[in-house]
Image (tube, helix red, strand yellow):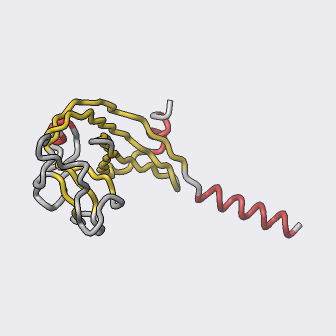
Amino acid sequence: MKKSMLFFSLFLSFQASSSERFSRILLDETHQSAVTLNTETVRCSAVGYGFPELKVTLESLKWATIFDHSNQDGLGPCITAGTMLCEDFTVPDVLIDSQNETENIAVRVTLTESFTISDQKCFRSLDEDVTTTIRGIPFTHRRSAFLGELNVDECKSLIK
């Protein structure tokens, strides 16, 4: 009996603290962009992340996204390939070619609205993801914003 009471109380506490999550895609577009690849636009930088990441300035993000994808370095909107390609802040040779500084790329921008229902509250947020590949290297960037709370019934009506 004690075991079943313990199990039941644990089950109820889990149910009370569990949350329900759902999302919907608001925008999923791909645009073509010419990216300039030189020592001014390609860099290994720790600004905004704490660890050196391979970053490329991508000017088309100024008008093709909702969020500002710039970091604090003042070099405009950027995308990142992460930390694996930056060794001692050295930019990989595959990206910079003085004979060919421009690359035409397809840039995908996805805007997703997410909802989390927890403790009778509904929290709403937006995530904007940018993805592309430059000279065989995948690049991404994400910006998010919390948009506040909704009534739980309103929130659930959006699931339909």
Determine the residue positioned at 64% across, 55% down. Answer: 15
Q: For the view shown, which residue lies furthest in the right direction?
A: 1
Determine the residue positioned at 28% across, 60% down. Answer: 53
In this image, 35 relative to 139: left or right? left
Height in image: 144 above or below 160? below
Of residues 1 and 113, the one nearer the viewer is 113
Report whether residue 69 is seen. no
**Residue 51: image x %, image y %?**
30, 68
**Residue 23: image x %, image y %?**
45, 40
**Residue 63: image x %, image y %?**
15, 37
**Residue 28: image x %, image y %?**
33, 31
In this image, 117 relative to 25: left or right? right
Of residues 83 and 11, the one nearer the viewer is 83
Report whether residue 31 is seen. yes
Determine the residue positioned at 28% across, 52% down. Answer: 80
Q: For the view shown, which residue lies furthest in the front direction?
A: 99
Total numbered circles: 0
- Picture quadrant of residue 85: bottom left
- Picture quadrant of residue 54: bottom left
Q: In which quarter of the image is the N terminus?
A: bottom right
- Picture quadrant of residue 113: top left
Determine the residue positioned at 38% across, 50% down. Answer: 149
Of residues 48 and 18, the one nearer the viewer is 48
Height in image: 55 above or below 99? below
